[in-house]
Image (spheres, rainbow, N blue to C red):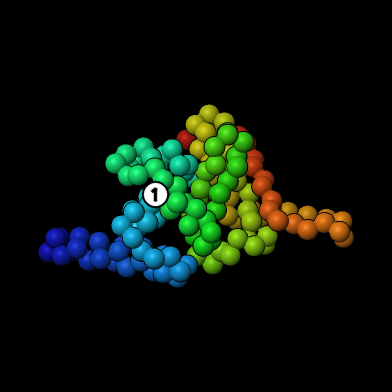
Amino acid sequence: MEENNVIKEQHTMQETLDHRLTERNIKPTAVRLLVLKAFMAQEAAIGLADLENRFDHADKTTLYRTLKTFEEHKLIHSIDDGTGALKYALCEETCDCAPEDLHVHFLCTVCNKTFCLNDTPIPQINLPTDFSLDSVNMVVKGLCSDCR
């Protein structure tokens, strides 16, 4: 009986992964499914080096291209938290990465983990008339709950 439940859970997870990719017009490949599963298991943003360590037998170029594909199709977003390496986090399912979808990020100064604060939108920025907004990056720094 337990084995049937495990198989059902695995099947449901596979369907979820496939759906998340196909709804963003990304062809599900073995590597893409594994990388997406890793993102879904994370509570903090992860960098390319983290993925390389997790998938030490995977081709680094393939991992990099997977991240870029995910970012181009708005499945993940990149975060420049000031640590010198971009980190990536899974977007909300309804996110289109438009300025109104942007949110604040939190960098723990002890463990260097970066968290999405999805419920804290970037404040509206009033630009001069002849300026146009492409992106906004707001990082708040402090101690996360694990490091306090």
> Which residue, as the protein is rendered here, is positioned at the far right?
129
Q: Residue placed farthest to the left in the image?
A: 1
**Image height check: is 120 above or below 100?**
above
Q: Residue furthest top?
A: 110
- Where does the image place residue 37, in percent across and percent down from the top left? 36, 54
Check the image and report above or below for 41 versus 84.
below
Q: Which image quadrant for residue 80?
A: top right
Q: Position of residue 40 (x, y in %)?
A: 40, 54
Question: Which residue type does callout 1 highlight?
Answer: Thr
Percent coordinates x, y for residue 83 in the rendering: 58, 33
Residue at image coords 29%, 41%? 57
* Residue depicted at x 56% and y 49%: 78
Image position of 41 with respect to 6: above or below: above
Disc 1 designates what residue? 62
Which residue is at 51% across, 62% downward? 73
Q: Is residue 21 visible?
A: yes
* Residue in the picture at 38% in, 52% down: 35
Q: Seen in the image, is 130 located left or right of residue 71?
A: right
Badge 1: how crowded within 10 Å, few (<14), some, or many (20+)?
Answer: few
**Pick the front one: 113 or 80:** 80
Quarter of the rendering containing residue 139? top right
Tag 1 secondary structure = helix
Count the labels in the image: 1
Which quarter of the rendering shows the N terminus? bottom left
Residue 42 in view (yes/no): no
